């Protein structure tokens, strides 16, 4: 095995260790996709307290409306979000966090931030900044590669 192949194998193994560590985190009562959706709804509600309309949420999540319908239905069923019809136009439905959803998100965010803070303390300031730099550089590269592949797929 040459040096680059060895580096590739080590990098893949490192990513697998990170994923394995992530999967050992305490189980959440909702799926990751639902958590991300709640976070996006929270951001939208900070801009517009009425909430976000379904179509805009689909755009933000980069998903087709039929894909997010069951996701939103499940969050409504668990009372984390609610649907509210616009009084001006009854066809428009806003989605917003309930008090329960806001409390859940705030608690989850505190727990997550505490875990990241523990990592920062473990790594130290210099290594944390280096990790941020390297992950940012890798992310930019991967996004560029995926955008090219996406553009080529449309040809």
Image: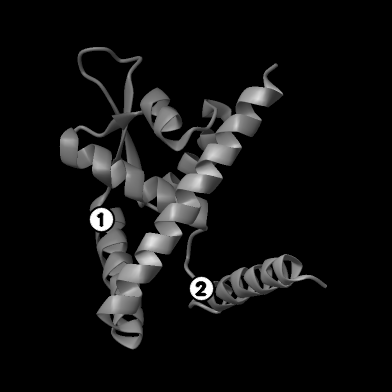
Q: Position of residue 80 (x, y in %)?
A: 35, 52
Q: Is residue 131 above or below residue 66?
A: below
Circle 2 residue: 27
Instruction: State the CA–CA distance, disc 1 to disc 2.
Output: 19 Å
Mark linked to residue 133:
none
Dots 1 and 2: beta carbons under 8 Å? no
Secondary element under disc 2, as helix, strand or loop, is: loop
| Residue 39 falls left or right of residue 86 | right
How many residues crowd mark 1 within 10 Å: few (<14), some (14–19), many (20+)? some
Q: Position of residue 147 (x, y in %)?
A: 56, 33
Question: Which residue is depicted at the point 65% across and 32% down?
Answer: 149
Question: Which residue is depicted at the point 48% across and 77% down?
Answer: 26
Question: Which residue is depicted at the point 36% across and 69% down?
Answer: 130
Q: Does residue 26 show up?
A: yes
Looking at the figure, which quarter contains the N terminus?
A: bottom right
Q: Position of residue 50 (x, y in %)?
A: 20, 32
Q: Does residue 74 show up?
A: no
Mark linked to residue 102:
1
Looking at the figure, which quarter contains the C terminus?
A: top right
Q: Between disc 1 and disc 2, whose residue precedes?
A: 2
């Amino acid at each position: 095995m040459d040096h680059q192949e060895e580096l590739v194998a080590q990098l893949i193994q490192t990513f697998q260790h990170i994923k394995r560590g992530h999967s050992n985190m305490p189980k959440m009562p909702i799926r990751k996709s639902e958590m991300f959706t709640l976070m996006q709804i929270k951001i939208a509600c900070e801009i517009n307290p009425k909430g976000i309309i379904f179509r805009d949420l689909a755009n933000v999540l980069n998903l087709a409306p039929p894909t997010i319908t069951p996701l939103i239905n499940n969050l409504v069923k668990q009372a984390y979000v609610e649907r509210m019809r616009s009084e001006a136009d009854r066809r428009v439905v806003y989605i917003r966090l309930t008090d329960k959803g806001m409390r859940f998100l705030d608690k989850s965010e505190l727990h997550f931030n505490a875990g990241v803070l523990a990592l920062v303390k473990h790594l130290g300031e210099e290594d944390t900044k280096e990790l941020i730099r390297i992950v940012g550089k890798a992310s930019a590269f991967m996004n560029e590669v995926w955008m090219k592949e996406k553009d080529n797929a449309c040809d």
